[in-house]
Amino acid sequence: MSAFLVSATEARMSFFRFFQLALVIMGALMTSACAGVTGKAVTGGPVGGVGSSTAIVTPSSANFGNVPVHTSGSRSLTLTNTGTTALTVLKIEWEGKGFSAGGGNLSAKKVVRPGASLNFSVLFAPTETGDAQGNLLITTTADSTPLAVKLGGTGWGSGGSPVIDATPSSVNFGNVTVGTTDTQTMRLENTGAADLTITKLSVLGAGYSASGLSLPHTLAPGKDTTFTASFNPKGSGGHSGSIAISSNASSSPLSISLTGSGVTTNARLSVNTTSVNFGTTRVGTTLAKNVQVKNVGNTDVEIASVEAAGTGFKATGGVDVTLTPNQSTEVAITFDPKALGGIVGTLTILSNAPTLRVALEGQGGGQVVPHSVTLSWEHSSSAVVGYNVYRGSVAGGPYTRINPSADLLTSFKDHTVLGGLEYFYVVTALDGRGIESGFSNQVSVTIPTP
């Protein structure tokens, strides 16, 4: 016997600080006619002088133009100390409805060094339609009289009417398995300037429905609500539909298009092997192997029973398991032969998918008797560090290694043979890199029955 090795946009207008009421009113009227934030700086503090601080705000006014009701507009401003000593912001006040602070660095107790600036923003968030006027008053240590920045804007809406918006404006449910339901949350918002009253939802199209909204339903300006659109196809193929939403908005009814496709249910399981061979197992001992079961369909599969038929075969696991698409589970199969000779069986898996069957096979071996097999072979002509001995119960394998580790001896004695059985042997060689050769030629021997 021998063994062989393998290798291996904005208009402009100026504003000044006013000290007479008549001029202030005039300035306010002028402001309401322009848009943007332009003009000369508002100044506070002594004019010149040694060791003085002077505060200016640029631009000197901020007009927000038209801003939709229940939204907000923003303008950026800058407070600068043009004096020679530091100033401190003492107080910030707001006059006028809808005006407030935005972001930035302007705050009470803020110190501004000579030549330094603070950037900040103001907001206009109208809650009703019409013109709005106001002032931002900033008191600093530079002057006891506050700096006054004129503010103006117009709250705009659809003539005081409600406006309905839907998000999303259309829905594509994609592929939905026949008999199941897919859902989409819909949001309805009143973006107008008057109360919106939703009075009716009408759904058209087979399989489509809507739920979750009590009618009539009233939304104040800027408010929203949600409901659920559903698709439950009764047959395969494409389906189209719509939801019509009736309200007191001028655009009523608002239509939302719906599309989707029904696909046939495909409940199917697969296993990672169609047969399991336990080889030879001595009577009175048990050998275990696992079979992987996977859901390869497009719907849930409920496994009702897993049974192994055939003397000595037993199956555990996998019962009362629900597999979602692409999910797997394992079934353990044991072989415990009760008699000598070949044994066949079947693993059967029952579920709401087609039945799965896996062939089972094993060999019951006889009792251990004082028999042995002595093997010998010629030393390999290549440089080797040891040999491995393999044994099988059928010609051509499969084989199982029976020596505990590679050995340089060119002989081996097998003391674990059973009476009345035939065995098949092959040998391999290992080189210094641990690379193992292919199998040698096969020899066989039949053990006498005691």
Image (cartoon, grey):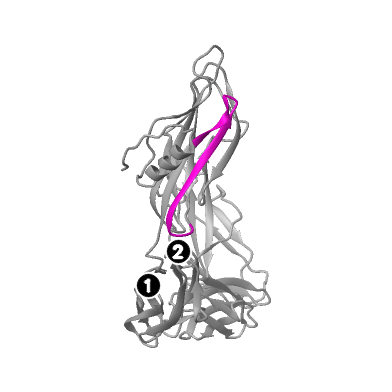
Res 146 quadrant in image: top right
Can residue 431 be seen by looking at this rendering? no
Q: Position of residue 376 (x, y in %)?
A: 52, 56
Lateral position of residue 281 relative to residue 32, left or right = right
The residue positioned 53% from the left and 58% from the top of the image is 389
The N terminus appears in which quarter of the rendering?
bottom left
Q: What residue type is labelled 1?
A: Val
Q: Residue 214 carries which label?
A: none
Q: Measured along the vertical axis of the image, is residue 94 above or below residue 91? A: below
Question: Tag 1 or tag 2, which sits nearer the N-term?
Answer: 1
The C terminus appears in which quarter of the rendering?
bottom right
Residue under pointer 1: 171
Whether the magenta-drawn stretch holds residue 147 is answered as: yes
Can residue 338 be seen by looking at this rendering? yes
Question: Label 2 neighbourhood size at 10 Å, few (<14), some (14-19), many (20+)?
Answer: some
The residue positioned 41% from the left and 76% from the top of the image is 248
Q: Position of residue 259 (x, y in %)?
A: 34, 77
Stretch in magenta: 127-148
Whether the magenta-drawn stretch holds residue 297 is answered as: no
Lateral position of residue 14 relative to residue 390, left or right = left
Q: Measured along the vertical axis of the image, is residue 349 above or below residue 159? A: below
Residue under pointer 2: 442
Foreground disc of the pair 2, 1: 1
Q: Which amino acid does label 2 sit on?
A: Gln
Label 1 residue SS: strand
Question: Label 1 neighbourhood size at 10 Å, few (<14), some (14-19), many (20+)?
Answer: many
Residue nearer the viewer, 119 or 242: 119
